[in-house]
Amino acid sequence: MLQKCALCGALSNDAVCRKCEQILPRPQHLCRRCAKPLFQHHAICGDCLRFPPAFDEIKPVFSYQYPLDRLITTAKYGENFSVLKQLGKWMAEHFKHEKKPDVLIPVPSYLNDLKKRGFNQSVELAKWIRKDLDIPVNTNICHCIKQKRPQAGLSAKERHQNVKGVFEVKNISKDWQHLVIIDDVVTTGATVNEIARLFRAQTAAKISVWACARALK
Ligand SMILES: [Zn+2]
Ligand SMILES: [Zn+2]
């Protein structure tokens, strides 16, 4: 069914037309661990060398830049489920050649966000990846148990402090060798690092983060 492209308004078979899809910002030269952009061809950034994160890797599909940022805003705050589906499909396409992980675990919504929106965008993205790549999604073991202060305006260090104690991870399966955390946008990595820290306390499995987009900081 034809619909209007969410970016340019042209008629398209999908939520975003082919032309607009081609100009979406794809990241290059990233830290292999935290996916921070690097200006030289180092494999790992200085921060990850000094303070290794709890996850093994962050793999973003896009950079959180115009016009991808607009699509995320439309999906999340405009509750546009066809854009959300499109983003999930692009993620599935991007990760289809990866060795199949055992489970996808979406970042839980912060309590206020879920109340406000009524849906969790990371769960929606994970569902589309599950559909295309046939990887189970688990939304039972990781929960948000405490409201955090807003992250905006906080330094990276303050953000890491701010998410401490906000999540809870129940018993994870001993059979899982590779866990993938699904997030819509990784900003400083504080949230996914905190969740990975809780997983790491229970398992030696590989922990990856598949993100729709990564902020350029
Ligand atoms: Zn378009
Ligand atoms: Zn790094």
Image: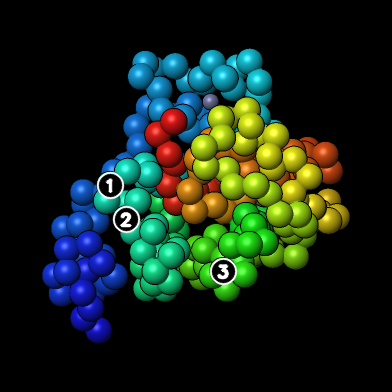
- The residue that appears at 56% across and 35% down in the rendered structure is 154
**Which three-letter amino acid code belongs to the residue tagged 3?**
Lys
Q: Which residue is mark 1?
A: 66
* Callout 1 crowding tier (Cα within 10 Å): few <14, some 14–19, many ≥20: few
C-beta proximity under 8 Å, tags 3 and 1: no
Q: Earlier in the sequence, mark 2 or mark 3?
A: 2
Q: Earlier in the sequence, mark 3 or mark 1?
A: 1
Please give left or right for residue 6 compared with residue 150 in the image: left
Q: Are marks 2 and 1 in contact (CB under 8 Å)?
A: yes
Query: Label 2, label 1: how many angstroms apart (C-alpha)?
Result: 6 Å
- Please provide percent x and percent y for residue 209: 57, 45
- Residue 51 locus on image (x, y percent): 66, 20
Residue 83 visible in rendering:
yes
Could you say where residue 164 lies in the image, as x and y percent from the top left?
74, 40
Assign a secondary structure to mark 1: loop
Apparent side of residue 48 relative to residue 216 in the rendered image (left or right):
right
Callout 3 secondary element: helix
Res 116 quadrant in image: bottom right
Residue at image point 52% right, 37% down: 153
Q: Is residue 58 above or below residue 210?
A: above
Q: Nearer the viewer, mark 2 or mark 3?
A: 3
Residue that carries the numbered disc 3 in the rendered image: 116
**Residue 70 got which mark?**
2
Q: Of the residues shown, which amino acid type is indicated by label 2? A: Arg
The amino acid type of the residue labelled 1 equals Tyr
Distance (Cα) linking label 2 and label 3: 20 Å
Please identify the quadrant where the C terminus is shown.
Answer: top left
- Against 72, residue 23 (above or below) is above
For residue 215, which quarter of the picture?
A: top left
